[in-house]
């Protein structure tokens, strides 16, 4: 018998990095005239996540449709942003979908697949591409503290997912999303963006 879980997950967009190889904070980069941070929020919104929390750091930005939380420890890496984001969520939040600001072609359809896995019983679900886990990731509330404990330095949820592989449900998203990220000016050019 499958277990169903009610309640929309929150959306958590990690957008704190300075983009050292890119030369500008990634949140501010534009593709087709839209900042990456706004694209990420829109994607999570279209997937039905609520509320949406954006973790900032190198650049303080206002984002329509999201709660913006500044991570004062952003220089220490993605781990502190994940911890900041998880602690910013209300205690009643049933689950969260974690996405990264520098992956402009992760889609709402991929998030909806993670939500479908959650709604039919998955407690942790991760999008896979070519069989490899990438982003986004969905984590149910009862694992927030454990995921936060594994988030150190520039490691977000990856070590948690490895340690708890027994509960992770892989969700193939090859046909609906692209996890490629923007780290360098060449990446940005490939995606048609601008600084």
Image: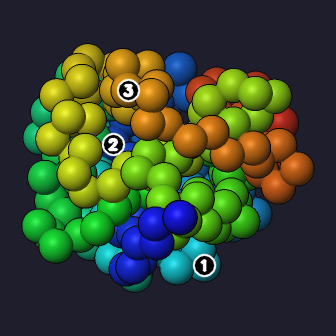
Please state which of the two labelled residues, at mark 2 or mark 1, is closer to the viewer.
Answer: 1
First-in-chain label (3 vs 1): 1
Rendered position, 48 above or below 52? below
Q: Provide the residue designation for mark 2.
A: 16
Q: Which residue is mark 3?
A: 164
* Local SS, label 3: loop
CA gap, disc 3 to disc 2? 26 Å
Mark 1, Cα crowd under 10 Å, few <14 / some 14-19 / many 20+, is some
Where residue 181 appears, as percent x and y from the top left, is 65, 34
Figure check: 195 above or below 48: above
State the residue at coordinates (58%, 59%): 117
Q: Position of residue 56 (x, y in %)?
A: 29, 50
Q: Secondary structure at mark 2?
A: loop
Q: How many marks?
A: 3
As drawn, which residue projects farthest toward the right?
Answer: 175
Q: Quadrant of residue 82?
A: top left
Q: Kindly state the secondary structure of the residue where label 1 is placed.
A: helix
């Amino acid at each position: 018998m499958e277990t169903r879980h009610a309640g929309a997950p929150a959306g958590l967009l990690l957008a704190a990095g300075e983009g050292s190889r890119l030369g500008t904070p990634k949140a501010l980069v534009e593709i087709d005239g839209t900042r990456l941070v706004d694209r990420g929020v829109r994607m999570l919104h279209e997937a039905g996540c609520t509320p949406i929390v954006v973790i900032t750091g190198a650049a303080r930005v206002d984002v329509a449709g999201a709660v913006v939380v500044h991570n004062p420890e952003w220089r220490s890496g993605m781990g502190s942003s994940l911890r900041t984001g998880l602690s910013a969520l209300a205690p009643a939040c049933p689950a969260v979908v974690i996405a990264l600001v520098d992956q402009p072609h992760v889609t709402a359809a991929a998030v909806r697949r993670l939500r479908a896995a959650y709604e039919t019983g998955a407690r942790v679900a991760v999008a896979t591409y070519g069989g490899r886990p990438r982003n986004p990731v969905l984590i149910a509330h009862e694992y927030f503290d454990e995921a936060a404990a594994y988030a150190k330095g520039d490691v977000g949820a990856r070590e948690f997912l490895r340690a708890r592989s027994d509960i992770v449900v892989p969700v193939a998203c090859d046909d609906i999303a692209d996890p490629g990220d923007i780290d360098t000016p060449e990446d940005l050019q490939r995606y048609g963006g601008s600084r």
